[in-house]
Image (cartoon, rainbow, N blue to C red):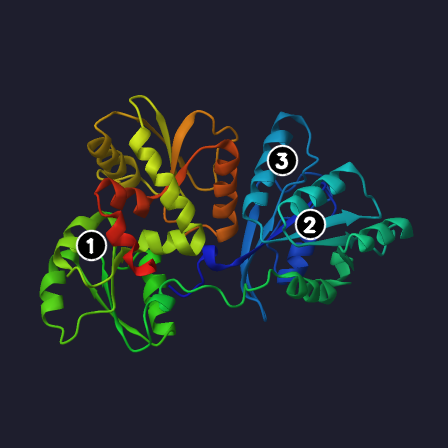
Amino acid sequence: MKETPKGMRLHIGLFGRRNVGKSSLLNALTRQQVSIVSDTPGTTTDPVEKPMELLPLGPVLFIDTAGIDDVGALGEMRAERTRQVFERTDLGILVAAEGHWGEFEEGILSELSARKIPVIVVFNKDDLSRPHPDLLSDLRKRKVQIVHAAANNGLGIPDLREALIRAAPEGFIDSPPVVGDLVPPGELVVMVVPIDLEAPRGRLILPQVQSIRDVLDHDSYCMVVKERELSKALDRLKCPPALVVTDSQAFRKVAEDTPEDVPLTSFSILFARLRGDLREFVNGVRAIDGLKAGDRVLVLEACTHHPIGEDIGRVKIPRWVRNYTGVEPEFVHMQGHDFPKDLSPYRLVIHCGSCMLNRREVISRIWRCREAGVPITNYGVAITYSLGALDRALSPFL
């Protein structure tokens, strides 16, 4: 895997009315024809993503959106897809053109500000018409960064790149470790990786790859084994490992084969901490105890994969929860960036490890669950809790 995963990139969303030049601006920023450009309003229908390197920030993901002022039934669907991008935006670019500024622009600015998302206002097509001085003065009073641009001829593009670097959320460049802060340099981490139907042919899944890289980045070293080989592998070591990390599905067997004095956790719990809020997920998992027959449980899968016979989210987790509770809840599944507007029908949300999402989107989902009063947990926490092994899985963090 040569490219930085999307979940580890800074997500930069471009918002604005139709035909203000968002796509032209993105093409100018990336120096590529990423988005279709036309004088016809509403050319961009679904969000268009473009990963690239923006130094010194490093890996970023630009997201070009449809005009949020789109009209009609189809236009409202496009606008709704645009609003979903707010959930995963780390840094916003609000594009206005020819000096026009009104309720749409104020609404976008308010939405980004309410979410505490840094925003840059770009007045595009500035060669045709300049914004009113009073508007510029008002935006500066609100400490909004302003860039004047004309994407078609490259005017203001260097200024916009500099503004993006200045506005990037603090700490993005020094991203938190996956596992490196749990293991001293020079110590061994054993990673247990089942090779089953869910393992992609010829490679490892993303959390495993990122965890291995993080161990190496922190000057430790790792040994990768299948769950059936763990016991023999540990017996051959002169010293016990500093940590064992396993796929959640194999936690029960791995716990049996790992000495009690060796810290043990799962990849999913590592990513609960990295992408979301581990404390919130631990608090939320206790809602499993109160589930009754017929209660609806929402299972969120960030990646869009074809379910297999023993799919973890659709088969194994429901089975473990049913075995633990002795009741039959109803499990509802959503994939990708889909997330319900109304959470009231659900008694619990169980989120995947989120390796395909950025932290902003996961935190947004946690916040929405909290506002709705619906507990949220994640795969790794829910699995170990249902197996009676949550305390063991949290031992490295205590």
Q: Which quarter of the figure has residue 126? A: bottom right
At horizontal 35% and vertical 64% (from top left) the residue drawn is 179
> Horizontal and vertical percent for residue 387?
21, 43
Contact check, label 2 and label 3, Cβ < 8 Å: no
Contact check, label 1 and label 3, Cβ < 8 Å: no
Q: Is residue 236 above or below residue 196?
A: below
Residue marked by disc 1: 195
Residue marked by disc 2: 22
Q: Is residue 253 left or right of residue 95?
A: left
Residue marked by disc 3: 79
Describe the element under mark 1 as helix, strand or loop: loop
At horizontal 14% and vertical 51% (from top left) the residue drawn is 253
Label 1 vs label 2: CA separation? Answer: 44 Å
Label 2 vs label 3: CA separation? Answer: 15 Å
> Horizontal and vertical percent for residue 217?
38, 73
The three-letter amino acid code for the residue at tag 1 is Ile
Q: Which numbered tag is attached to residue 205?
A: none
Q: Earlier in the sequence, mark 2 or mark 3?
A: 2
* Mark 1 burial class by Cα count in 10 Å: few <14, some 14-19, many 20+: some
Quadrant into which the N terminus falls? bottom left
Q: Nearer the viewer, mark 1 or mark 2?
A: 1
* Mark 3 burial class by Cα count in 10 Å: few <14, some 14-19, many 20+: many
Q: Earlier in the sequence, mark 1 or mark 2?
A: 2
The three-letter amino acid code for the residue at tag 3 is Ala
Q: Is residue 385 above or below residue 145?
A: above
At horizontal 85% and vertical 56% (from top left) the residue drawn is 127
